[in-house]
Amino acid sequence: MFDLWLLLQLAPLLSLGFNNMVLNFLEDVLLHTFPLPPLLIKSSYKKLYNAFTEHATSILDEAERLGIDRDEACHNLVFLAGFNAYGGMKATLPILIKWVGSGGEDLHRRLAREIRSTVGSEGGVTLAALDRMSLTKSVVYEALRIDPPVPFQYGRARRDTVVRSHDAAFEIKKGEMVFGYQPFATKDPRVFDDPEEFVGDRFVGEGEKLLRYVYWSNGRETDDPTVGNKQCAGKDLVLLVCRVTLVELFLRYDTFDVECGSLPVGSSVTFKSLTKAAITLRPSDVDDFLSWAADDRVALYLRWDSVASLEASESYLRAVTIPHLWRRSIYIGDRSMRYVSVKLRSGVKQCRARVGYIVGAKFWGRGFVTVRASPLSHKMRGSPPQSPQQHQQSQQHSIDTVNAAATAIVATEARAQPAAVQIGATKSQIGKVNGGIAVIYQHQRQRLSSFLGPVLSPRRLI
């Protein structure tokens, strides 16, 4: 319903892209000369109005308390949600993705590096983290500079005034209609180098001084909206949504390709490819690993000696951990303090898997591994063997073994035993496991690999 309503609102700006003079003339007469009859959308608008009347009672009550007519307030809410929010972001986000996509892999790598390192150091996507992302902010500003989502402004002069450019002055009389076209300012070659080029870091560092010449919000980017200046009241929210969009995109993907097109109003963007984020090793990952791998109390129960240096930690992570098929970190906030791993057996034992886990000493006995291992037991309990023959022979044995293994974890952590064991065990041996579990399941190796992925995925490999 919003789309149809927006169509009539934006009809004076629509361009159907005809290359024929006769068709262009008809387009001007039909769309750009007279208002389209509101009867076309009356019933749809009434449904929207009734929905807001019913569900926005608290806002409408507050409007009445402030002396605003309830009916007028409801119409303004419909306009705010339909035109400003829905229509505005529907025009803005494709523009953002289009221009970021045009920046290529180099820009994408820089954005991903900034976003992931900042989110990691701040412990999540917070306002403080967003404020530290200078390149991300600059990319959003640059997209809005080169391609303002609402490039046209109209208004009547409230008083006699003179508008000055670099080399001329224009006198405007009170009551005259004034038309503004933002790209005349945002692509001014006397202000911006290569104004027709998308430069992602244009507003980084000293480039921030150029923000006063960016007018996408019907005013200078350095100004704040007021009752009297008619600048977009939601401009800061638009910037925030755009930045969060980029953050969430590059937390998940390294790069992407898009195909751009045009609409009667605005742009269309189609993702042609998305490259998922590769596994990376942050300095904090090495520090986290060293915090428990260098602890002799933990190493006492491992098959390998404690790690003594940052260099040795990084070497182990790159050589052993990252290539590991199923090793997943368990996090507190954004810091890794332990892991759970599954190692598939080979040869005649390829139908079996070995589960191991390691926990820093200060987290012993607190149940962290239990929380992560429980979904594993449920997943394996509900997955049938690959062949009917295996299913008949091993289903009950496997279920019993997984349940016993989960019980062993709980018992082990309750006794605050060192949480680092990699042991193979049969059903008869499972009660003797102290500090670890072994899961025996009669599945083929390929079948086991296919369902372990979604289970052991707290955050990323370590």
Image (cartoon, rainbow, N blue to C red):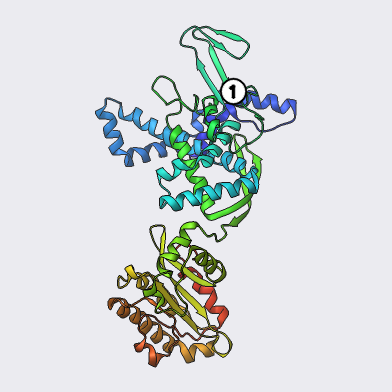
Between 15 and 225, which is closer to the camera in this rendering?
Answer: 225
Between 394 and 322, which is closer to the camera in this rendering?
Answer: 322
Q: How far across and how far down the image is residue 19, in percent? A: 74, 30
Task: Give above or below for 272 relative to 193.
Answer: below
Q: How far across and how far down the image is residue 86, in percent? A: 47, 39
Between 293 and 270, which is closer to the camera in this rendering?
Answer: 293
Q: Residue furthest right?
A: 20
Q: Residue furthest left?
A: 65
Name which residue type carries label 1: Ala
Looking at the image, which residue is at 51% across and 70% down?
453
Q: Quadrant of residue 213?
A: top right
Q: How far across and how far down the image is residue 48, in percent? A: 41, 39
Residue 36 visible to the viewer: no
Task: Give above or below for 325 relative to 121.
Answer: below
Task: Give above or below for 312 relative to 92.
Answer: below
- How many marks are shown on the rendered structure? 1
Q: Quadrant of residue 434?
A: bottom left
Q: How far across and how far down the image is residue 117, in percent? A: 49, 51
Residue 364 visible to the viewer: yes
Looking at the image, which residue is at 42% across and 26% down?
224
- Check disc 1 and report the residue beneath it: 185
Q: Residue furthest front?
A: 308
| Neighbourhood count class around disc 1 (C-alpha, 10 Å): few under 14, some 14–19, many 20 upward | some
Left or right placement of residue 220 versus residue 417 in this view: right
Left or right placement of residue 54 versus residue 357 in this view: left
**Helix, strand, or loop for circle 1?**
helix
Q: Quadrant of residue 433?
A: bottom left
Looking at the image, which residue is at 43% across and 83% down?
438
